Image (cartoon, coloured by chain):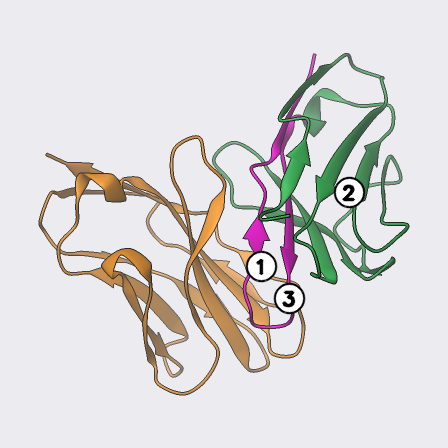
Amino acid sequence: GAGVSQTPSNKVTEKGKYVELRCDPISGHTALYWYRQSLGQGPEFLIYFQGTGAADDSGLPNDRFFAVRPEGSVSTLKIQRTERGDSAVYLCASTAGTGYGYTFGSGTRLTVV
Amino acid sequence: AQSVTQLDSQVPVFEEAPVELRCNYSSSVSVYLFWYVQYPNQGLQLLLKYLSGSTLVKGINGFEAEFNKSQTSFHLRKPSVHISDTAEYFCAVSDKGYQKVTFGTGTKLQVIP
């Protein structure tokens, strides 16, 4: 596609529920990133995929968070047993390679009530 | 591990006045440096980047930044701001050869008519 697409744009869920956030990167971009942005903060790294594999998942806060990219294109970020502290904007970005800079999606605003 | 410090959380400036947004980074290796802009209710957009070569980098919308290795800084400047420049600006760094990018906490630029 022309840009990075994230769905849904907004998600409200109850504490303890499971959520999935989807990212569709720019066609041909092999690298895909997930970041989380809390109010008043800069984007915080979660995980990075090179192709189908997670090249670096050091930013995932705990084992409730998991992400997949089974065919090397679309990625899904999965959060189990959501907590109110998970409320944030989840950003996805893709890039053509090192030094190119990221192209970001518009984000998914997750609110856990 | 790299880190980024944006010293000013908010910068008010009158329209048509010059502005400088400060950014300092720390890293044990050579780096790539970026500035991203986030307009209200929009996603992050790449403003400019430094990879190598000339230390003065020009970006979109009349912005420029200067890489200073000895001071580990990458300050963003514009000689004359417009109302439309009101946004949040994020400085970011990555180690050369590595795709993961670390962001600062952002500086909100408020242009006053």
The local crowd at label 1, few if under 14, some if 14 to 19, many if 20 or more residues have their Cα within 10 Å, is many
Query: Which amino acid is tagged 1?
Result: Thr
- Quadrant in which the C terminus of chain B appears: top left
Identify by letter the chain in orange.
Answer: B
Residue name at image x 36 percent, y 54 percent: B7
Residue name at image x 83 percent, y 34 percent: A78
In this rendered view, identify the residue nearer to me: B78 or A60.
B78
Mark 2 or 1: in front is 1
- Which numbered dot is residue B102? 1
Measuring from the top left, give residue B47's x and y in whole percent.
39, 58
The residue wearing badge 2 is A61
Q: Which residues are magenta?
A: A87-113
- Quadrant in which the N terminus of chain B appears: bottom right
Measuring from the top left, give residue B26's x and y in whole percent.
51, 70
Decide which of tag 2 and tag 3 comes sooner along the chain.
Answer: 2
**Chain A colour as displayed:** green
* SS of the residue under disc 3: loop
**What subunit carries mark 2?**
A
The residue wearing badge 3 is A96
On screen, residue A108 versus residue A39, left or right, reads: right
